[in-house]
Amino acid sequence: MPTAVNRQIMLVEKPAGKLTPQNFRMAEAAIPKPKVGEVLVRVLYISLDAANRAWMQGVTYREAVDQNAVMAGGTIAEVVESKVPGFFAGDLVLGDAGWQDFAVVSAEGLVKLPRTEAITHYLSVYGIAGLTAYFGLLYVGKPKSGDTVVVSAAAGSVGAFAGQIAKLKDCRVIGIAGSREKCKWLLSELGFDSAINYKEEPLFKSLKVAAPNGINVYFDNVGGDIFEACLPQMSKYGRIVCCGAVSAYDGVPPTTGPRGVPGLIVIKRLTVQGFIFTDFIAEREAALAELRSWVNAGKLQVREEIIDGLENTPDALIGLLAGENRGKRLIRVSAPKA
Ligand code: NAP
């Protein structure tokens, strides 16, 4: 049984504008005891997701995080003590144990993980990012060979997988990202056909050049101005995959745009569909098998940025929202036992 205290990062209050380190505080608590039906876990890795910011604002696809509560977050953890049949000390589990060293969690929200592969992949390519990209692109976007696919936040965790999967389906892929380095990476390492730096290039014009025949599938991670620039350039019967709206998560909510909704959607007979990756969770095993085959064959690159230390979690999320990350960003809280 561990003797250390439980460090916890609490959300002090709902942020009024951009997220800052002052919105969080570190607390220390006793390590909790599991009751029947619960397990005590030690957190190994925390997933940083753009949606963490949206959870602070209100109800999304999950309940909002309360002020003065431990910040929620997807985690890989190791079972320390179990009061649940079938879970044993030393098991690795995927779940939401939050931004802390230890947590008591109910077994219902836990998925056991094998120790056979890079376990961080269960927070990236075999976790929320990979499955969101896979289901969103293939089940909602339904790309056909030769289609032009545009992905926003393309160098981020979901976007980098969505663009690579579109390439595996023989599409022409245009990525939109926020720096020259990211655009270079999309082109030289991930095999995108074009990349647009939306912070430096005229987005509407650059899209016209990159997609002269229009966009068949727009995988929208950001909403706002980028959605508005893509909308009129959609081809007839195009599909817009509404995955998320990171441009609206951090800061004061936008008061304008995207303009053209619903007029252009009607004229162009567009399919605009929102989804949460869990809508397709019944297909998880089939999706994982295909993702694994691409990763093992070297056809799908997995980039993970692993930052050490629970105390660095707030800054790492603030940096992700500002566009610091390439691929999936994670926090390593502690090392798994061998
Ligand atoms: P991520 O893409 O790894 O990181 C967020 C990225 O968004 C940043 O790196 C930044 O890159 C970009 N960004 C930030 N502000 C922006 C703005 N105003 N305009 C354009 N780009 C901006 O994060 P993620 O966790 O993978 O999430 C990506 C999207 O997927 C989010 O919208 C999230 O909510 C959504 N999502 C949806 C589901 C689902 O089930 N529907 C599941 C997971 C995630 P730049 O340098 O390019 O600006």
Image (cartoon, rainbow, N blue to C red):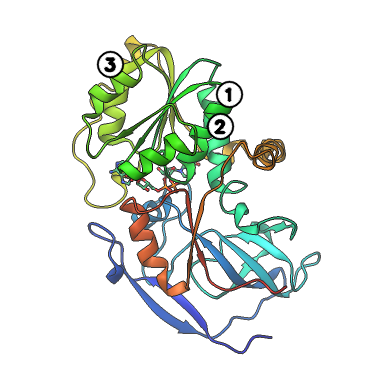
Q: Secondary structure at mark 3?
A: helix
Amino acid on which the number 1 mark rests in the picture:
Lys
Identify the mark nearer the N-term, 3 or 1: 1
Give the CA separation, mark 3 to mark 2. 30 Å
User: Where, by quadrant of the figure, is residue 86 drawn?
Assistant: bottom right
Q: Nearer the viewer, residue 274 or 151?
A: 151
Report the residue marked by disc 3: 263
- Furthest-left residue in view? 255
Mark 2 closeness class: few <14, some 14–19, many ≥20 residues within 10 Å: many
Ligand 1's quadrant is top left
Mark 1 closeness class: few <14, some 14–19, many ≥20 residues within 10 Å: some
The residue at 48%/42% (across/down) is 158
- Furthest-front residue in view? 188
Q: Secondary structure at mark 1?
A: loop
Amino acid on which the number 2 mark rests in the picture:
Ile
Give residue 165's mark.
2
Report the residue marked by disc 1: 169
Identify the mark nearer the N-term, 3 or 2: 2
Image location of residue 29, percent across then percent down = 49, 84
Give the CA separation, mark 3 to mark 1. 30 Å
The residue at 40%/16% (across/down) is 270
Q: Nearer the viewer, residue 70 or 131?
A: 131
User: Where, by quadrant of the figure, is residue 44 drawn?
Assistant: bottom right
Q: Is residue 144 above or below residue 71?
A: above
- Furthest-bottom residue in view? 3
Are discs 1 and 2 less than 8 Å apart at CB? yes
Amino acid on which the number 3 mark rests in the picture:
Gly
Res. 153 visible in picture: no
Res. 28 visible in picture: yes
Is 197 placed left or right of 186 in the picture? Answer: left
